């Protein structure tokens, strides 16, 4: 079931771990097994350790460390720099480098694409202490085509630690518990069956003796998604909650079957894939998560389609739904919530009085920030239901209103009178690198240049903003009450409807995407970046940067008032020479830039301390989802892709 490379943990490393690469320094650091962490330890700001892949169970990506401060950050130097040896140079099958390590007692633990290898790495020297590689179903003899196809591995966002184990999900729907000292498998549980399209795309999270993770089939037509909790000690399933309600459950009547009589069941194939990790509120016993979009993308029956495209709060110990807030009704546009939320306490007006309230914030793909009360799920800043265009075409069934927050939009797309982000048809490009406004659609007609929530049908391709705020990790600054986000401006997609009767089930039984689309290929000449700081109490931007290259890294903040973020490359990013930047969290002013790196940065940085010395570390390698280094196509060998970790410290 596994292949493990194990190197002595207390002596000078002299062996080369299969697939790994060493820094120049040796390691004398022994791995200390993690204890049964308390909720208070996991909920506190990160400090010497970075115990959760987004800093803490509140998702804030905030550290209490202050050794690196505004007066000395400009002197940061590279402490170590390694290649993990899993991605051959210029290989288009390397997946996306988007993982965030966790750190305990000076050891980094991380998981990387394409295979889902898990590494234990000395956080001081960069020495690889062990590596584990999952094995996959290869099919019966002579029938390898029936085995599991790893492909590029997509993205591997990270792992969880606790109780002497490292917990990692895999693309074939499994959750593994690895021995923290040796990397050997202690237990494995099935979250979702890969033969039914199941996979685990989000990092697990450990809390109070449980490991929580989400599943999903993406848009491949597999089974509907679930959130599940497992016992950390033995992998026993504690509970699971399905995004798509079953018969008799609340929300079931928000679905109806398409007019096509042979359409698959919504209950089994409704979508809702989980792309991010739950946030945990142990005081209120809540697990809060953003859910995925429904499938097929169009020609579904009428209804709001709960609980897709929603922020949901589940009881941490039973999985029962406590509250929900749907951010897009009857989604036709892939409007899921792939970005991590953040939890905080701030002041709001409630019934005419200004009071402190426990809050949670999520930004959607269009730069709209939803700030909700964690106890009730109700908006703390106004989110009116706005009338949007409605189609009367057969089977479109578009919803007449959508919630559009009054908080400032994080993007630089133009907004219409109702504050809907719109496409610039002269900037966004077709996959043939022609501006949509100047191109001809596959049906021979001009494209219709539109805005978010414009419906589409079989008669015309409609171009609208698409996947602009995706996985790049958001963060929170408690000193400034600011929510800091990173995304892509002017990314777009043209869509046309497939009639219900023409939709065909895929290999896993569901209809999947089922739309005619022309993608924006994330070209360096058409897309740009946005890096923005929103005050969560006022809903106003405190600063907002428009980069010539996309922002696809995400951020981390420290108590010394510094925000770290990665860049994709110089100019429009086409050179792929990324770098790490330090900014003043309050003003957004640049404090330091690292020298250029070998590859783009598409993962968020982390910070930790060992022996009284603070480090800032980041994965470097580029992303497949928004890749400005691919103007010649996804499989061209000129494409930049790497598998490095670069770590900085004061001299």
Image: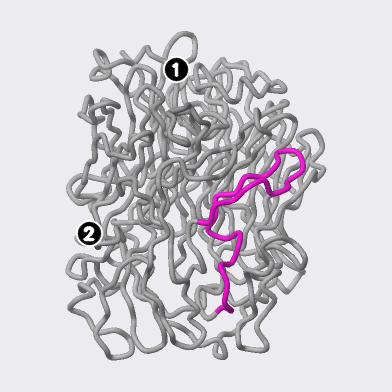
Expressed as whole percent of the image width and height from the top left, the position of residue 641 reads 38, 51
Tell me which residue sits at (76%, 45%) in the image: 188
Instruction: Reply yes or no: does residue 545 show up in magenta.
Output: no
Image mark for residue 414: 2
Viewer can see residue 221: yes
Name the foreground residue: 481 vs 231. 481
Q: Is residue 442 above or below residue 194?
A: below
Q: In which quarter of the image is the C terminus?
A: top left
Query: Magenta residues?
Result: 300-326
Where residue 648 sits, quadrant-wise, is top left
- Location of mark 1 (residue): 64
Q: Using residue 418 as the reference point, say whether residue 39 is left or right of it.
A: right
Expressed as whole percent of the image width and height from the top left, the position of residue 556 reads 40, 31
Q: Using residue 64 as the reference point, say whether residue 229 is left or right of it.
A: right
Name the foreground residue: 247 vs 386. 386
Q: In this view, does 477 lie above or below 512?
A: above
Query: Which element carries disc 2, helix, strand or loop?
Result: loop
């Amino acid at each position: 079931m596994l292949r493990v490379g194990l190197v002595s943990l207390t002596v000078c490393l002299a062996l080369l771990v299969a697939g790994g690469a060493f820094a120049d320094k040796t390691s004398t650091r022994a791995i200390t097994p993690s204890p049964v962490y308390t909720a208070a330890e996991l909920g506190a700001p990160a400090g010497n350790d970075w115990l959760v892949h987004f800093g803490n169970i509140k998702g804030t990506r905030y550290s209490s460390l202050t050794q690196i401060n505004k007066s000395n950050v400009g002197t940061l130097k590279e402490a170590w720099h390694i290649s993990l040896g899993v991605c051959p140079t210029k290989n288009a099958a390397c997946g996306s480098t988007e993982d965030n390590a966790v750190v305990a007692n000076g050891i980094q633990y991380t998981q990387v694409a394409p295979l889902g290898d898990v590494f234990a790495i000395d956080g001081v020297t960069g020495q690889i202490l062990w590596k584990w590689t999952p094995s996959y179903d290869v099919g019966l003899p002579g029938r390898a085509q029936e085995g599991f196809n790893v492909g590029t591995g997509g993205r591997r966002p990270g792992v969880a630690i606790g109780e002497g184990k490292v917990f990692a999900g895999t693309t074939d729907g499994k959750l593994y518990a690895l021995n923290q000292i040796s990397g050997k498998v202690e237990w494995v549980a099935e979250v979702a069956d890969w033969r039914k399209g199941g996979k685990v795309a989000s990092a697990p999270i450990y809390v109070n003796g449980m490991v929580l993770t989400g599943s999903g089939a993406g848009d491949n037509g597999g089974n509907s998604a679930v959130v599940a909790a497992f016992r950390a000690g033995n992998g026993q399933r504690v509970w699971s909650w399905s995004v798509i309600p079953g018969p008799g459950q609340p929300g079931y009547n928000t679905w109806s079957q398409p007019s096509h009589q042979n359409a698959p069941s919504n209950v089994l194939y409704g979508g809702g894939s989980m792309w991010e990790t739950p946030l945990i509120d142990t005081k209120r016993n809540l697990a809060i998560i953003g859910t995925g979009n429904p499938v097929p993308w169009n020609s579904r029956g009428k209804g709001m389609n709960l609980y897709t495209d929603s922020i949901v709060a589940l009881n941490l110990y039973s999985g029962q739904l406590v509250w929900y807030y749907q951010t897009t009704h009857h989604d036709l546009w892939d409007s899921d919530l792939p970005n991590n939320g953040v939890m905080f306490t701030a002041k709001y007006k409630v019934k005419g009085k200004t009071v402190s309230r426990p809050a949670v914030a999520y930004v959607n793909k269009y730069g709209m920030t939803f700030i909700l009360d964690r106890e009730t799920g109700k908006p703390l800043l106004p989110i009116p239901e706005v009338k949007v265009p409605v189609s009367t075409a057969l089977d479109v069934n578009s919803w007449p209103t959508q919630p559009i927050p009054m908080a400032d939009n994080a993007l630089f797309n133009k907004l219409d009178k109702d504050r809907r982000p719109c496409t610039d048809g002269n900037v966004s490009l077709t996959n043939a690198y022609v501006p949509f406004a100047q191109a001809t659609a596959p049906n021979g007609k001009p494209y219709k240049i539109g805005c978010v929530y414009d419906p589409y049908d079989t008669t015309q391709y409609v171009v609208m903003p698409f996947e602009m705020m995706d996985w790049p990790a958001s963060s929170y600054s408690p000193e400034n009450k600011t929510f800091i986000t990173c995304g892509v401006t002017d990314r777009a997609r043209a869509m046309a409807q497939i009639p219900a009767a023409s939709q065909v089930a895929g290999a896993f039984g569901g209809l999947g995407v089922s739309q005619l689309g022309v993608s924006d290929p994330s070209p360096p000449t058409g897309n740009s970046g946005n890096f923005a700081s929103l005050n969560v109490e006022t809903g106003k931007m405190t600063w907002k940067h428009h980069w010539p290259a996309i922002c696809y890294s995400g951020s981390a903040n420290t108590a010394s008032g510094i925000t770290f973020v990665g860049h994709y490359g110089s100019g429009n990013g086409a050179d792929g020479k990324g770098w790490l930047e330090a900014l003043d969290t309050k003003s957004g002013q640049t404090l330091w830039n690292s020298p250029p790196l070998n590859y783009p940065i598409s993962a968020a940085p982390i910070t930790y301390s060992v022996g009284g010395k603070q480090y800032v570390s980041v994965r470097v390698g580029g992303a497949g989802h928004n890749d400005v280094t691919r103007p010649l196509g996804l499989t061209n060998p000129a494409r930049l892709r790497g598998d490095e970790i670069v770590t900085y410290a004061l001299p």
